């Protein structure tokens, strides 16, 4: 006789059922507020994470909804009919490229009596979800976002007129404005190749389409010139100065050193330059460094960089967002061309 297998229900699902019983016992109706999460945790003798998971499960089933900074409520989230003169802007960090874009967008919004509300996700899908909920709750009339692909479902369900910029999410029908990262990177690496560099490393980020496109352009340029990419010459993590410094430390601490480094953005490049100065490695006499973005930082550091024209990008984002807010069909894809700005950080490879 076969012994029946035992199954255990996850604790958060048991709690979800308990919250539904509590709603019924207290006679709570749609729109009524639930007890605070701390009280639920104490009442059901579970931790705060289990409460969060249970409420998330109930929200996905349309049985409760959260209102940022206010609490959790019974019933499906009401569709916001009130629209304000606020436009949501969402991007991952305060890197100068995004700051320049919001500055350009703000000046355009002002002509129409609109104002931006800015949220930073810091690369966290959870923060991005909360930001989208916040934008919906306050009733923004439009949204410009540099999205995280992990939030695809939330963007599919979004009822706010929206435009992506800097990156996109495949399969999500939201118009997007991007730069040609593959071609821009290819152009930059070909500049290094023309200077005689063959040992070229790449320090970049990972986890987003922009980073993937820049890596693809890097590899394509080297393969097109018949060059290989040595093991360890590609270092990927994040767009930060600290990562640029640490990755350079790894590269130049090995026996096989590059003569040039292509960086995924100017912020990474600034960390590389800081490392080179600290170790007495001359740039560009010993090592050439190339950035991406052509930010004010690159001008200050005399860094050669691939230019992303902020004004052109912001103009395209605003044009498409206006179309979405009017209910007119926007351009699904707008691709902006880049250009190479040569400064003092790149020169001929040392013989």
Image: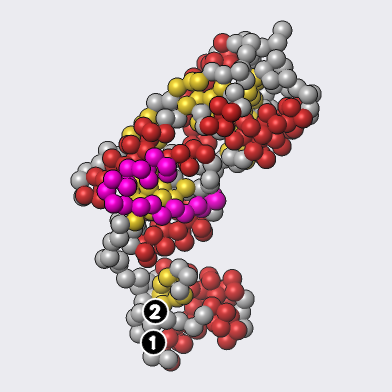
The foreground one among 302 and 69 is 302
Question: Within 10 angstroms of label 2, few (less than 14), some, or many (20 or more) residues?
Answer: many
Secondary structure beneath dot 2 equals: strand
Q: Position of residue 345 (x, y in %)?
A: 62, 20
- Tell me the quarter of the picture where residue 31 sits: bottom left
The tag earlier along the polypeptide, 2 or 1, is 1
Q: How is this picture coloured?
A: secondary structure
Quadrant position of the C terminus in the picture = top right
Q: Position of residue 193 (x, y in %)?
A: 58, 14
Q: From this viewpoint, is residue 235 visible?
A: no
Residue at screen point 74% across, 27% down: 277
On whether residue 48 falls in the magenta region, the answer is no
The foreground one among 66 and 218 is 66
Residue 172 vs 198, above or below: the answer is: below
Residue 140 vs 40, above or below: the answer is: above
Residue 280 located left or right of residue 143: right
Disc 2 from disc 1: Cα separation = 7 Å
- Tell me the quarter of the picture where residue 243 sits: top right
Residue at screen point 47% across, 61% down: 130
Task: Give the residues in magenta.
Answer: 102-123
Residue 74's label in the rendered image is: 2
Q: Position of residue 7 (x, y in %)?
A: 57, 75
Residue at screen point 36% across, 43% down: 107
Secondary structure beneath dot 1 equals: loop
Q: Are marks 2 and 1 in contact (CB under 8 Å)?
A: yes
Q: Which residue is mark 1?
A: 28
The foreground one among 90 and 111 is 111
Question: Within 10 angstroms of label 1, few (less than 14), some, or many (20 or more) residues?
Answer: some
Quadrant position of the N terminus in the picture = bottom right
Residue 78 vs 207, above or below: the answer is: below
Residue 234 located left or right of residue 334: right
On whether residue 115 falls in the magenta region, the answer is yes
């Amino acid at each position: 006789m076969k012994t029946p297998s035992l199954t255990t229900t996850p604790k958060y699902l048991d709690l979800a059922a308990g919250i539904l019983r509590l709603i019924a016992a207290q006679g709570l109706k749609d729109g009524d507020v639930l007890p605070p999460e701390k009280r639920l945790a104490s009442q059901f003798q579970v931790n705060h994470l289990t409460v969060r998971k249970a409420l998330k499960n109930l929200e996905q089933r349309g049985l409760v909804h959260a209102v940022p900074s206010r609490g959790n409520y019974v019933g499906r989230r009401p569709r916001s009919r009130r629209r304000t003169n606020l436009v949501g802007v969402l991007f991952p960090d305060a890197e100068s490229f995004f700051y320049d874009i919001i500055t350009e967008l703000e000046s355009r919004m002002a002509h129409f009596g609109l104002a931006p509300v800015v949220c930073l996700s810091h690369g966290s899908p959870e923060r991005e979800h909360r930001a989208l909920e916040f934008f919906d709750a306050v009733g923004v009339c439009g949204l410009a976002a540099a999205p995280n692909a992990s939030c695809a479902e939330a963007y599919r369900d979004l009822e706010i007129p929206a435009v992506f910029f800097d990156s996109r999410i495949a399969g999500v029908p939201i118009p997007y404005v991007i730069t040609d990262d593959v071609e821009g990177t290819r152009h930059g690496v070909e500049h290094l190749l023309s200077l005689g560099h063959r040992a070229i490393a790449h320090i970049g980020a990972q986890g987003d389409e922009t980073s993937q496109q820049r890596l693809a352009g890097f590899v394509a340029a080297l393969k097109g010139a018949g060059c290989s990419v040595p093991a360890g010459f590609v270092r990927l993590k994040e767009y930060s100065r600290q990562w640029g410094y640490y990755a350079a430390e790894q590269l130049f601490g090995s026996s096989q050193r590059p003569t040039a480094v292509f960086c995924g953005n100017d912020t990474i490049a600034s960390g590389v330059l800081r490392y080179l100065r600290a170790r007495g490695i001359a740039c560009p006499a010993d090592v050439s460094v190339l950035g991406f973005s052509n930010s004010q930082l690159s001008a200050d550091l005399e860094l050669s960089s691939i230019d992303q024209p902020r004004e052109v990008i912001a103009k395209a984002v605003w044009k498409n967002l206006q179309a979405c807010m009017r209910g007119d069909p926007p351009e699904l894809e707008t691709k902006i061309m880049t250009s190479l700005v040569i400064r003092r950080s790149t020169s001929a490879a040392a013989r």
